Amino acid sequence: MSGTMGRASRPPGKAGVLFGADLGGTKLRAALADTSGTIINELVEPTVRGSGEEIVAQVAATLATLAARAGVSPGSVRAAGLGLPLAVDPRTGESWSFHNVPGLGGLGGGAAGDAFGRALGIPVALDNDATCAALGEGRAGAAVGLADYAVIAIGTGIGSGIVAGGRLLRGAHGGAGEIAFLPLGTDPWDVQSRALGAYETAVAGPAIRRRLQEALVAGVATTLVAGSGLADIASAAGAGDALAERLLDDEARYVALGIVALAAVVDPELVVLSGGVGAIPALLEPVRAHVARLSARPPPIATGLLGERAPLVGALGLAHDLALRS
């Protein structure tokens, strides 16, 4: 699958349509593509904050909407690939670690894939969203042609997808790359760290907004407002806002800790920063600088070429591979 992310000049035949979706803690990004990876149509909407059944229904409704736009029936789409914020046991298919979309946990571990399959009415492959980001960047992004690389996806949560020797590194239970639980950044003994992960508590999007809110409450002068994300902070830092500069540097320091820990274990050719936070260009150079301070042999680091769409490209790749097997 090329993952060209272009636009089809005309609707493809029914036999050549694939569905992919990246379901995150705050938004759902979904698309139909032809078997070459060319996007036919795409939409983004807020993730339903409800039960697992409601989330499954949202994804099914998204497929129906996209299929109607393309002039095909949902049942004629060949296969679906889903990138979800959970871990998947490669041996049993059981799912776990649902904390960023807790409603999925109500489906039961092994039932998640079955529930999506029944609702969509087509073959479904699902995987961790950071793993999908790694697949996407490897197929059509910054890691094309590399056999050893890691993608660190930072958004509402944090995770990584690791490719070693040309193969996805999954671990015994699908937990390889769950760097949210590295004992870094915050107190790993805190009860919240058991549920969310000490590192995620320090580095993901909610942590950035929390540090900003603490500064605002303390009366620090700034052009930023409550709820500003890293993109807003980076823009303000570029305009000389001192608080924004500090917040951007703080985030870079936390990201650097995770990169150095990951590199010490898997020694990647390249680390790719992805996700709504990680793919912000202004983060790259300060991260590189801090990693260089922490490591005698810092790995090359790049911003992902696919931005927030990396998991979607990877999910479409899952659908493509599943269609070939079906």
Image (cartoon, rainbow, N blue to C red):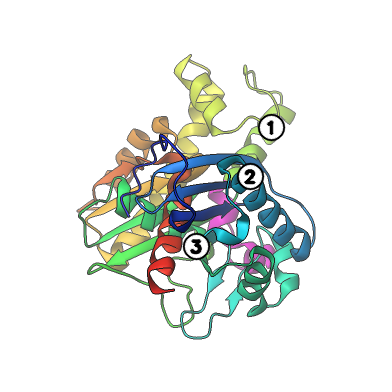
Circle 3 residues within 10 Å: few <14, some 14–19, many ≥20 = many
Residue 298 — which label? none
Circle 2 residues within 10 Å: few <14, some 14–19, many ≥20 = few
Residue 128: in magenta span: no
**Counting residues from the N terminus, which is met first, the one under dot 2 or under dot 1?**
2
Alpha carbon separation for disc pair 2 and 1? 36 Å
Alpha carbon separation for disc pair 1 and 3? 41 Å
Q: Amino acid at mark 1?
A: Gly
Local SS, label 3 = loop
Local SS, label 1 = loop
304 on left or right of 46: left
Comparing marks 2 and 1, which lies closer to the viewer? 2
Q: Which residue is mark 3?
A: 78
Between 242 and 235, the one nearer to me in the picture: 235
**Counting residues from the N terminus, which is met first, the one under dot 1 or under dot 3?**
3
Q: Quadrant of the C terminus?
A: bottom left
Q: Which residue is mark 2?
A: 68
Quarter of the image where one finds residue 99: bottom right
Q: Which range of residues does the magenta coloring cover?
A: 186-204
Does the CB distance between marks 3 and 2 fall below 8 Å?
no
Q: Is residue 74 above or below residue 38?
A: below
Tell me if I can see residue 18 in this picture. yes
Residue that extends furthest to the top in the rendered view of this protein: 239
Q: Which residue is mark 1?
A: 227
**Residue at position x 70%, y 52% in the image:** 61
Q: Is residue 196 above or below residue 278?
A: below
